[in-house]
Image: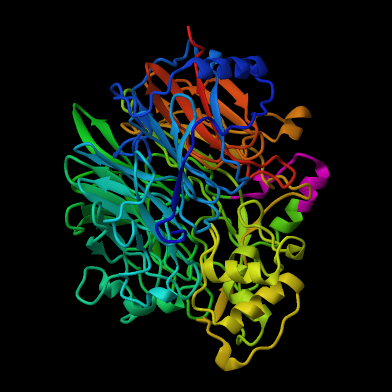
Amino acid sequence: MAGQAGKTSVVRGNEMSPIRLAKHAAPLGALFLSGLVCMALQPATARQPAESGAEWSSYGGSPDGIRYSSLAQIDRSNVGRLQVAWTYDTGEGQGGTQTQPLVAGGMLYAVTPRHNVVALDAATGKQIWKFESGVTGRGANRGVAYWTQGGERRVFASVQHWLYALDAETGKPIPGFGAEGRIDLREGLGRDPAKQSILLTTPGVVYKDLLIVGGRTSEGLPATPGDIRAYDVRTGRTRWAFHTIPRPGEFGYKTWPRYAWKVAGSANNWAGMCVDVKRGLVFAPTGSSAMDFYGSNRVGDNLFANTLLALDANTGKRVWHFQAVKHDIWDRDFPSPPALVRVKRGRKWVDAVAQTTKSGHVYVFERATGKSLFPIEERAYPPSDVPGEVAAKTQPLPTKPAPFSRQMVTEEMLTDRTPEARKAVVERFRSFHGCTPFTPFRVDQETILFPGFDGGAEWGGPAYDPESGLLYVNANEMVWTSSLTRNSITKSGRQLYLQNCANCHGDTLAGAPPQMPSLLKLGAKWDLAAISKITREGAGRMPSFPNLSPADVKAVSEYVLSGESKEIQPDEAAVTQLDYRFTGYHKFLDPDGYPAIKPPWGTLNAINLATGEYAWKVPLGEYPELAARGLKNTGSENYGGPVVTAGGLIFIAATNYDRKFRAFDKTSGQLLWETTLPFSANATPAVYSVGGRQFVVVCAEGSKGRPTDPKGSQYIAFALPHR
């Protein structure tokens, strides 16, 4: 039944549309045609036993989350011969899926822009089945989870607040899991399920017969608590839950106001996790508590927000923790799963966990004990001058490795791309407050946040090479600014908008594209019913707002569509209100729309985790129009991470504007191969092998490009030509 069990269609043949590829080091048009010929000649190999190292069966490649492949068929000597092996067009247009597909048993499992799930023959890209839940999902969905035991295989997929268990062979929901094959993530949180907003941006992790998940929650108030929960993979029954906002008697309870556990929200694991299978430890990084930027309702350090948690995977009990940001008022979430690494210390190998941050740091801890492998210093930062706010006096930062993103903005760093651009940005810069990390926001004066709201490191996560001990992380270098302003009593559509929506879309509805879309001129595409539905249910990165009454939803939707702010009766307003609110995310750009600081604007970094030193650092990405005018290798904003292989290569797409997919030498950082994709690929690749042939696949869809850039949704697999 659509909307409950959903429907599955089995498709014979390939539902692909032709891919459009620009020129690169090799003549891609010819390579693509030869790829189609090879694909047609190659027999389907789904469900055949895989050779060793051939599968990519977990988010991050394996339970340890290091994004490493032991395959070496594609190497430094032949990567320049890569060609398109197959493409799969979802036919659903652009939607910001950001999916890293999984590959197991010769089948590739992926998500479409509407959050349908497809299973493809991993050798040919032919669709085997497609699951449509009947619930329309939107926005980022980074993939599925996979479990197998005794010949039984299941895929776990999320659509909005529903979590489905699907038969990996057929795509049909498994009746014995929850109710008709799905469970409702809003339930079991100790609060009214109808008023909760939670979905899975990143898939959970599998340990034995447990599926362990976090969730994406609202960043404003009211917000859903960020409990980490383990479900039985067969029945969907909750086996354990860890309260990231501690309840009375639990460790960390005294770091919050007394009643916070009843009303506070978030402190959630939205970025994903990894598992030490041998030790039975799950490592879960968390984000900030709501409201992100003003914390008068949560005075204290706020454990376990902004914390790397090591939990007993069997029971959910805390083994150790490290809180990177105390009383976060900058949205300094841990942005990605950690990587489980082995580090050489003297003559001894240490099993460790490495966690990257938005602030541009890497923390490295002993896996079993939480002891840091490098010294951590408590550094003092200025207090807040906002009434009611009590900022933490110090924050803990590692002395090594050095940050992979710059930490301070000075006038010398400002752009000199043109004299006009420099003059404009210098004038604006002098009006800002702060220039260092952890400077609290002010009321009605823009404060600098650098690295910006999206890092530093972001959700793509690092890759780790066990052969060299190098950790590879891509990073952004974008200056953002914002401020707080006084809240007023909610009595109109505009005030509802300012309290619930302006956090992301700004006071003027202009947003900060492409991360935060503009809401201007929505009337050309949407009507009141559609806007109201999205407001109630959420869409992609936007949470649902179940706390708003029908009158609230109508008022704010009318304001967004028409700009008309109608008065509403006080007893119809249902908004949790603080004295101050966030005014939105503002990029510091020059008058032509380029970053206001000198390059690099994005980098790829290789860090030796044994010494804490950098092996190399290179710019990642370009603006094509600037490159054409001679301003090359600037780097650019980038989302989606790298993978590293035994063949000596790093594969990464991620860059927002040049639509490139690249391969670097993992030892030197030398660019060895690149191709232009039909759309930018803000997703992490996957590496696998079927029938003795190695593939590298990436999802391209273009949602983080500029409005004029091409959009779509295709999975594109590359391989060496058949001999």
Where is residue 700 drawn, in percent x and y?
58, 37
468, above or below 188, in the image: above
User: In terms of depth relative to the viewer, which is nearer, 635 or 205?
Assistant: 205
Q: Quadrant of residue 253?
A: bottom left
In this rendering, does residue 361 appear at all? yes
Horizontal arrangement in the rendering, residue 550 relative to residue 466 (left or right): right
Which residue occupies the extreme top position in the image? Answer: 723
User: Which residues are the magenta region?
Assistant: 409-424
**Residue occupying image coordinates x 55% and y 55%:** 138
Find out whether residue 133 is within the magenta segment: no
**Residue occupying image coordinates x 35% and y 68%:** 301
User: In terms of depth relative to the viewer, which is nearer, 372 or 93?
Assistant: 93
**Residue occupying image coordinates x 45% and y 53%:** 201
**Residue occupying image coordinates x 43% and y 28%:** 122
In the picture, which quadrant includes the N terminus?
A: bottom left
Find out whether residue 422 is within the magenta segment: yes
